[in-house]
Structure formats: C-alpha cells, structure tokens
C-alpha cells in the first residue's frame, strides 16, 4: 500500500473530527474525505486537532460515498459487527489487514457514524469488512479510538 485515504461517513461531532485530523497528522495521512452535508464547528474542530488544524482546510467534502471511494484500488469498511452478526461478508481483524493490503497501491479506509456505523448499502460498496476484536458485551469503540487503532495497524 502506498496511499491511504480516510473516508469519514457523516461524522457526527466536531470534537471527533478534530481528533481524527490530529491522528491523520500523527500517521502522515493527508487524504481525508468526508461524506456529509453536516456543518462542523470549525473552531472546535481546530481546537481538538491541536497542531494538525491545517488539515481541516484540506478536507475533501463529497456528497456520496461513491465519490469518496472513486480511484481507490481496494476499499475497506470498518464495522463493530463480526461475521456472525449478519455483515454482508466475513470480517477481517484489523491486525490482519497489513498483510492483505500489501499488494495494493491505494486503499480507502471507511468509517461510519458514531451512533449507527455504516449502512448495509454503504458496507456493500467495500471489498473488505474489518473489525477490531473487542468484548462481545460492548463491541463498539469511540470513532477516534477506532481510527487510531487502524492507523497504527496499517502504518506502523
């Protein structure tokens, strides 16, 4: 993999968006698409981005997930649900992604809404569904935490 694009689908909060921008800077990710018509509190985003606030101005806003995925060799969607929970395909652990993605040039890594994740339709547009193994009693991570784990797994 020589290029990673973060795709954020309808991120619900300015704080999470700012923290994700900071993570993107930590891991040298410069290509960040946001699929949303939502208006974010720019001051709050930049506050939580800390010294990565410059990335806010380079966010690529698109109106559809198709636009965000265009041009990527492979698309990975993230989900809190495991294969047994009726995801459209088998899920791959975040730890196994580096090996699976090693032969691809450009990778889209897609994250859903904090409250509901990605829809089935959005999941169907990706080639791989991936999950971070967590407790079955409470499998959902905060969006920012999930982004941090994936970036670490893929780029360290």
Image: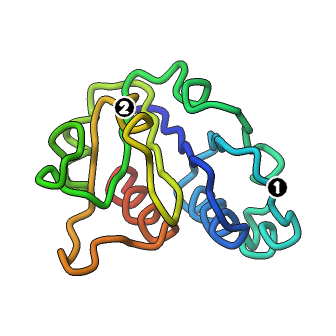
Q: x%, y% of residue 79?
A: 33, 54
Residue at the farthest right position: 43
- Left or right, 10 with respect to 133, comes to right
The circle drawn on residue 126 is: 2
Q: x%, y% of residue 143?
A: 49, 66
Residue at the farthest left position: 84
Q: x%, y% of residue 123?
A: 37, 38
Q: x%, y% of residue 10?
A: 62, 51
- Asked which secondary structure carries label 2, the reply is loop
The circle drawn on residue 111 is: none
Residue for point 37% across, 33% down: 1
- Asked which secondary structure carries label 1, the reply is loop
Residue for point 69% across, 73% down: 15
Quarter of the picture holding the C terminus = bottom left
The circle drawn on residue 39 is: 1
Query: Mark 1 packing: few (<14 Cα in 10 Å), some, or many (20+)?
Result: few
């Amino acid at each position: 993999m020589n290029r990673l694009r973060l795709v954020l689908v309808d991120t619900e909060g300015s704080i999470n968006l700012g923290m994700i921008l900071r993570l993107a800077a930590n891991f040298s990710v410069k290509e960040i698409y946001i699929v949303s018509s939502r208006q974010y509190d720019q001051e709050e985003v930049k506050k939580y981005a800390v010294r990565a606030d410059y990335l806010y101005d380079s966010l690529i806003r698109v109106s559809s997930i198709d636009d965000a995925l265009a041009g990527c060799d492979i698309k990975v969607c993230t989900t809190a649900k495991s294969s047994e929970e009726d995801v459209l395909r088998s899920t791959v652990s975040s730890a196994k992604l580096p090996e699976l993605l090693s032969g691809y040039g450009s990778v889209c890594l897609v994250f859903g809404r904090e409250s509901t994740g990605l829809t089935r339709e959005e999941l169907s547009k990706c080639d791989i569904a991936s999950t971070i193994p967590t407790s079955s009693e409470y499998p959902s991570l905060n969006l920012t935490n999930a982004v941090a784990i994936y970036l670490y797994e893929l780029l360290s």
